[in-house]
Image: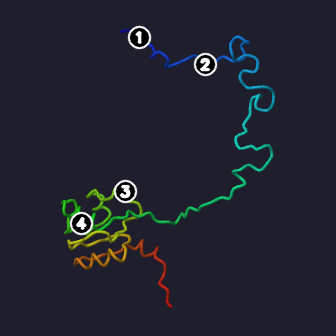
Amino acid sequence: MKLNDIFDNYGASKPRMRVGRGIGSGKGKTCGRGVKGQKARTGVAIKGFEGGQMPLHRRLPKRGFWNPFSTDYNEVNLGRIQAAVDAGKIDPANPVTIESLIAGGVCSKRRDGVKILGVGVLTTKLTFDVAAASKSAVAAIEGAGGSIKLSAVAAEAEPPADPA
């Protein structure tokens, strides 16, 4: 095979249509644009224009809000952590942190930290150093003989307790 033998598959490319080249070409005279009017001319950018009427995208109300101060936690259930401990991916002697969970394959990214949720059974005594935890998770961890320390970032985000 030589370079001059190489060509596209049949039908892979077709020549561009040359418009305005006579009636016999099939795209002569108006070149497939119909007759007269704004759209027959060049430089038309109508898109959402509705003839001077207020366009639909401006008539409808804006919806939604994105909170720039929101937190995005890795939510991990106790049962998943227990499964990682049983599989030998997390060492019970060391504290469970975001780094140990990423190393153990339980989480994939750091995000804003870890929130421990209380779904599943925890039988191993573990020490947790995480951003947040649900009440049921804290009760399950302390019930298994472990302890949990919430990081300062999560404490600042918590609203102050109501004095009344």
Give the mark toward the camera: 1 or 2. 2
Cα distance, mark 4 to mark 3? 20 Å
Name which quarter of the figure residue 45 lies in: top right
> Which residue is under mark 2?
16
Q: Residue at x 34, y 76 (%)?
A: 136
- The type of residue carrying mark 3 is Lys
Q: Answer few, some or many: residues within 10 Å of disc 2's Cα (few below 14, many 20 plus, some between 14 and 19).
A: few
Give the mark toward the camera: 2 or 3. 2
Q: Which label's residue is closer to the chain start, 1 or 3?
A: 1
Q: Farthest bottom residue?
A: 164
89 sits left or right of 98 in the view: left
Looking at the image, is 31 positioned above or below residue 112? Answer: above
Cα distance, mark 1 to mark 2? 25 Å
Cα distance, mark 4 to mark 2? 64 Å
> Which residue is under mark 1?
3
Q: 114 and 41: which one is in front? A: 41
Q: Answer few, some or many: residues within 10 Å of disc 3's Cα (few below 14, many 20 plus, some between 14 and 19).
A: some
Q: Which label's residue is closer to the chain start, 4 or 3?
A: 4
SS state under label 1: helix
Mark 4 and mark 2 in contact? Answer it, CB < 8 Å.
no
Q: Residue at x 21, y 59 (%)?
A: 89
Q: Position of residue 103 (x, y in %)?
A: 27, 57
> Which residue is under mark 3?
109
